Image: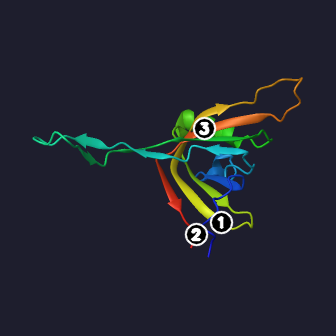
Amino acid sequence: MPNETYPFVAFNFEVQLHIPDATSLGLSDPLVTGAFAECDGLEMTMEPKKVKEGGNNTSQVHLVGPVTYGNLTLKRGMTPNFDLWTWFRLATAGTTRGLRAQGAVALWDGQGQLVAGFQLADCLPIKLKGPSLNAKDGQVAIEEFQLSYASLTLQVPG
């Protein structure tokens, strides 16, 4: 039984993106084999609809409104794997325009046990940023990638 007293650590996670028939498009499956240093944007928001009842001036009724999802931002040290760049190009032009991926983010505890998983449906690349280049700093070249997703589902192990 997991210890429900301590919060999860945020440094041990894995991101996978899968595109149908990726190898026929010259991509690897999963799409990303490099580790990410940052993953941000696992979020959903429900906007309630406010209804005022006639004759009731002291309260409002809140109905469930539409759900919106955030954009996932991923950062990593740039590697020779340029699949994210290729996917962006394929998804924005030609006969593969709108090429979507299915995503998964897994969160692991200190012992390597899966503690939570997030499933992302219909991911679409929306921003790709190359590294800031500065010869005097000697830092790792960091690339940033953003994608939108149609839905987010939490999966709890067991």
Q: Quadrant of residue 107?
A: bottom right
x 53%, y 37%: residue: 97
> Which SS class for mark 3?
strand
> Which SS class for mark 1?
strand
Q: In this view, does 87 lie above or below 13?
A: above
In the picture, the quarter occupied by the C terminus is bottom right
132 with respect to 144 (left or right) = right
Q: Nearer the viewer, residue 99 or 73?
A: 73
Q: Give the labeled residue for mark 1.
A: 114
Q: Is residue 56 above or below residue 132?
A: below
Cα separation between marks 1 and 2: 7 Å
x 68%, y 56%: residue: 9
80 with respect to 128 (left or right) = right
**CB of mark 1 within 8 Å of CB of mark 2?**
yes
Residue 31: percent from left, percent from top: 67, 50
> Which SS class for mark 2?
loop
What amino acid does circle 1 point to?
A: Leu
Residue 46: percent from left, percent from top: 39, 46
Q: Give the labeled residue for mark 3.
A: 146
Per the rendering, the mark at residue 157 is 2
Q: Residue furthest bottom?
A: 1
In the picture, the quarter occupied by the N terminus is bottom right
Comparing labels 3 and 2, the label whose residue is closer to the camera: 2
**CB of mark 1 within 8 Å of CB of mark 3?**
no
Q: Quadrant of residue 90?
A: top right
What amino acid does circle 3 point to?
A: Gln
Q: Is residue 141 above or below residue 81?
A: above
Q: Earlier in the sequence, mark 1 or mark 2?
A: 1
